Amino acid sequence: MLETTKNIGKDFVLSVEGLTVSFDGFKAVNDLSFYVEENEIRVIIGPNGAGKTTVLDLICGRTAATEGSIKFKGKELTKMKEHQIVHTGVGRKFQNPSIYEDLTVFENLELSFPRGHSVFGALFFKRDKEVIEKISEIAAMIFLGDKLGMSADLLSHGQKQWLEIGMLLIQDPELLMLDEPVAGMSVSERKQTADLLHRITKDRSVLVIEHDMQFVAEIADRVTVLHQGKVLSEGSMERVQSDPKVIEVYLGH
Ligand code: ADP
Ligand code: MG
């Protein structure tokens, strides 16, 4: 009774089909299929060890699939290297913020600006109007508009998480993947993060792993429940929450 629909006339930005990864015979992800639409916020939930982080590792090319297909905007990702996947427009945030603590908020965002990457880009990088405007725009979006000159190590844990989201947004990904983005955040920071995700999906899709069910209810268009590397249930938050299979797995833990 999965609500997953096959691609008939709909715009799926991401199609995962029959995805499997085997670690020494153990299938952490096992014949998994799911589809994410444009502008959708999809949340993946599931007990510890369900394979959630491994799914993101597979999509961003950090882990190679044993079988199956991952199509992003029609392009097969399973054959690509990590940096090529980034270039097709997939951005991924890891559980712990990986920002440059000794640089300012501005400098962190500047370093992530696409032109800053290549050797020549870095050498001849000018803080021209376009770059400064983009950095200001992103900083305002991530609630750090008045903190551009602040050293990143002085930010709260939540603000560091936002900065890392900003460092991804500045590259304009069409799919943004976040692993437990509100872990360690205060209630008000969680609310702001929910607002932020709703705003950024005007231009992109977001795939989030999250445990905080109140936050999931606030952001999810659809929820995919993962269990033992497979889809256990999928649909609206109300639907998966009342699914006896989901209740059993969660109460069983
Ligand atoms: P989740 O994020 O849902 O908690 P993970 O995707 O991190 O789960 O892990 C799923 C399962 O796969 C776990 O049993 C974990 O130990 C195993 N696993 C993940 N990565 C590896 C790896 N590189 N080698 C071996 N086992 C792994
Ligand atoms: Mg995980």
Image (cartoon, rainbow, N blue to C red):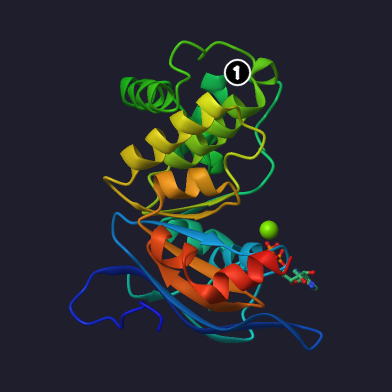
- The single residue placed furthest to the right in the displayed view is 24
Q: Position of residue 84 (x, y in %)?
A: 50, 63
The picture quadrant where one finds residue 64 is bottom right
The residue to which callout 1 is attached is 104
The quadrant of the picture occupied by the C terminus is bottom right
Amino acid of disc 1:
Thr
The quadrant of the picture occupied by the N terminus is bottom left
Q: Is residue 77 visible?
A: no
Q: Is mark 1 within 8 Å of ligand 2?
A: no
- Which residue is depicted at the point 56% across and 41% down? 119
**Which of these two is toward me, 202 or 131?**
202
Q: Position of residue 166 (x, y in %)?
A: 48, 34
The picture quadrant where one finds residue 227 is bottom right
Q: Position of residue 246 (x, y in %)?
A: 56, 70
Q: Position of residue 146 (x, y in %)?
A: 46, 10
Few, some or many residues within 10 Å of mark 1 (<14, 14–19, 20+) = many
**Which of these two is toward me, 133 or 123?**
133
Q: Quadrant of ligand 1?
A: bottom right
Q: Is residue 99 visible?
A: yes
In this view, 217 is above or below 116: below
Give the SS element for disc 1: loop
- The single residue placed furthest to the left in the displayed view is 9
- Which residue is depicted at the point 38% across and 45% down? 172
- Which residue is depicted at the point 51% across and 38% down? 165
Number of numbered labels in the structure image: 1
Residue 227 shown left or right of residue 27 in the figure = left
